[in-house]
Amino acid sequence: MSNKHGDFIWYELLTPDQDANRSFYEKVVGWMIDKAPANEANGMDYRMINSASGPIAGSMTLTADMQSGGMQPCWLGYITVDNVDDVAEATTAAGGKIHMDPHDLGGVGRIAFLADPSGALFYVMKPVPPADNPDASSNSFAATEPLVGHCAWNELASSDPAAALNFYHDLFGWEKDGEMDMGPMGQYQFLRHRHMIGAVMPRPQELPVSAWTYYFRVPDIDAAADTIEKEGGQIVQPPTEIPGGDYSLTAIDPQGARFALVGAR
């Protein structure tokens, strides 16, 4: 794979109602989402989320058992690594947790489900490239150009931003690349990994736990905001201008998962 250790390569929505959220996100973001599981043989309701250029994320049913274990509707990110087992071991050594031990997914790759020391969740993965395309790479995160329907920004709200910067630097080689003063909210610290990939900020009081938020690109931020409210979602932060001239918003989908959008006005 041409993606490098530390790259975001995939995103995943955990939701208790696949069909309801399929309709919501197709209208809000413009995605095309599978109506049926991508692979029914494994007994998992996992569906592909497609932009105009192909799959960029997946959607998985959040079962009652998963919810009883404490899992809530959410978006999760996958970070590619050279060795899943080594990263899982380094995570625990640094004070993080392993929520799902390293294991192989047939034909997909080796993965582990982890949490950083402040509790923010993420996957690590060493993918198996397609047999007919050994040099395949993921552009689920559009790191070098704006692509509608793709992730445009990865933002961590952490109860300990300084520790988070050290943790992700040690695991993935991410570097701090400047900061922006947000006044009482603290410093917004930018992350670079070959390209600008996102930022770390202090966790706002309204967030119960440290967590990643992923910003997906839409062609019209105001149209997307209107659709969110019409389709039963909740706007947390209305469209706000950001450096570069785009606008961003954060929202909660009808099933309770927090997400964000970025786009032009």
Image (cartoon, rainbow, N blue to C red):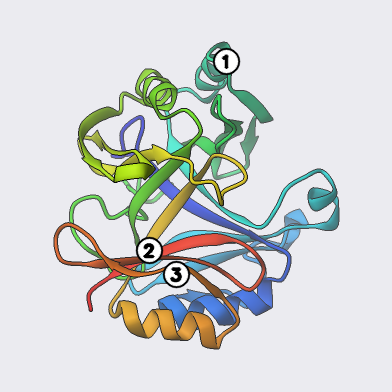
Residue 209 location, x and y as percent? 60, 41
Residue furthest bottom in the image: 230
Q: Is residue 83 left or right of residue 101?
A: left
For badge 3, the amino acid type reads Asn
Q: Which tag, 3 or 2, sits closer to the chain's start?
A: 3
Q: Residues within 10 Å of mark 2 (few under 14, many from 20)?
A: many
Mark 3 and mark 2: Cα distance apart in space = 12 Å
Compared to residue 86, the image places residue 261 above or below, namely: below
Q: Quadrant of residue 117?
A: top right
Q: Residues within 10 Å of mark 3 (few under 14, many from 20)?
A: many
Q: Is residue 222 left or right of residue 31?
A: left
Residue with the mark numbered 1:
89
Q: Quadrant of the N terminus?
A: top left
Q: Which tag, 1 or 2, sits closer to the chain's start?
A: 1
Residue with the mark numbered 3:
50
Q: Please report the residue visible at 73 percent of the width from the left and 48 percent of the height from the top.
A: 71
For badge 1, the amino acid type reads Glu
Q: Which mark is residue 216?
A: 2
Q: Please report the residue visible at 33 percent of the width from the left and 82 percent of the height from the top.
A: 222
Mark 3 touching mark 2, by CB under 8 A? no
